[in-house]
Amino acid sequence: MNQGGTEAEAGAGADAAAGVTVDVTSTGAPAALGHDFTADLPDELLIAILSRVGFLDGCRCVCRRWHQLCSDRELNGKSDWERWTEIARDRNPPRIIRQTNDILVLVVSPNGEWLCGGILNDVYVWRAHDGEQLRKFEAHRQAVRSLAAGSDGNVYSGSQDETICVWCVGSGQLLWRLEGHTSYVLGLAVNATHLFSVGGGADRTIRSWSTSDGAHVNTYTKHTEAVVSLLFDEVQNTLYSGSCRGVIEVCTASSFTHLRTLKGHEAAVDALAVGFRQTLFSGGRDHSIRVWSPDGALQRTLSTDYTVQSLLVRPSGILFYGTVTASVGAIQQGSGGRRAVLALPVARSSGDDWTFLVRPSRGQIHCGCSNSVFALGQF
């Protein structure tokens, strides 16, 4: 019996006796202990659990990530809204992870490991946590205007040259060049089996393509004006598309069956997002965000000071929006609509400074604006 050993060493000895190999670090957290089940759970759920069980030494024996969350008093002691207001008030400023030329569009991979940005005619892939460049793809003859990242490890880029390129991030190869649109490709969305694309200008169509071989599958022609935004909702298997005249069309993703038409915006709908209970949020050049029920009824209209370029809804009820003035706003739903706006630390241009928000990668929200990619914070 080793009476002089530490508690961690005693625990490690017990695990060794049970046939489990544990590498105990200086913090007392095991480096590996079989399958890390917490890796399958979102941070929000882990934090909710921690708020009920408190900080227990026994939690350290689960995994390193659990130990880090237990130890992070800053994370567990504040709400999403409190963390955002600290960022907006410059108490915890956003971190620049990459500086480059003007970013026209930004997406994040489904696993949160890399970011992909469109800069002029080229597509760049950066590691999400530190901005290190992983790939640069060159194939388009004109500016890249839309991007999508698939769970298959491929990147899809739409351009003003009316084509879509499909790239393999792992090998760096161009897999296919898809042709069929007759104007700018301004929106892309992808699921496990299909890529969806929208055409601006006189094109006015949504097209679907097979992700297995790049073959064209179907065309949706309900729009009467240029289509400028696209959203795929995997829960309902539904496509939402916004036009330059403020009309939103809703159809099934599988067959392009038309479901409904939403009218309310007075200018182009540039941003779309789905939130809790399949509520649709749309942002437009009419300086507004509109909230729609699942059956298409307009629930309310939120005014903004500028054009809304991107939208992101968090489970905590916070609605984030990016504008064309290098700023990110947040609205706390259900709390009187309180707001806080962050002006990004970039050199403003003479034109629009589009701000692209991307869905959280492992809890971290990223945005691209002007010549920088930012990590805004954990939410």
Image (tube, rainbow, N blue to C red):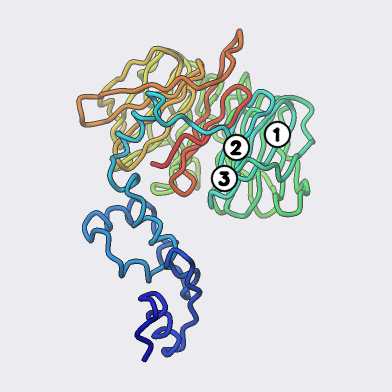
In the picture shown, does residue 148 fall above or below 41?
above
Hey, which quadrant is residue 163 in on the image?
top right
Query: How far across and down, in percent of the image, does residue 336 sit?
Result: 20, 25
CA gap between label 1 and label 3 equals: 36 Å
Q: Residues within 10 Å of mark 1 (few under 14, many from 20)?
A: few
CA gap between label 1 and label 2 equals: 9 Å
Of residues 68 and 247, the one drawn nearer to the viewer in this rendering: 68
Please name the amino acid that badge 1 sits on. Answer: Gly
Task: Residue at the far top: name it.
Answer: 350
In the picture shown, does residue 152 fall above or below 203?
below
Of residues 302 and 99, the one drawn nearer to the viewer in this rendering: 99
Which quadrant is home to the C terminus? top left
Contact check, label 1 and label 2, Cβ < 8 Å: yes
Mark closer to the chain start, 3 or 2: 3
Please name the amino acid that badge 2 sits on. Answer: Arg
Mark closer to the chain start, 1 or 3: 3
In the picture shown, does residue 167 fall above or below 20?
above
User: Which residue is denoted by mark 2 in the rendering?
Assistant: 207
Disc 3 vs disc 2: which is toward the camera? 3
CA gap between label 3 and label 2 equals: 34 Å
Of residues 311 and 192, the one drawn nearer to the viewer in this rendering: 311
Q: Secondary structure at mark 2?
A: strand
Disc 1 vs disc 3: which is toward the camera? 3
User: Which residue is denoted by mark 1 in the rendering?
Assistant: 180
Q: Secondary structure at mark 1?
A: loop
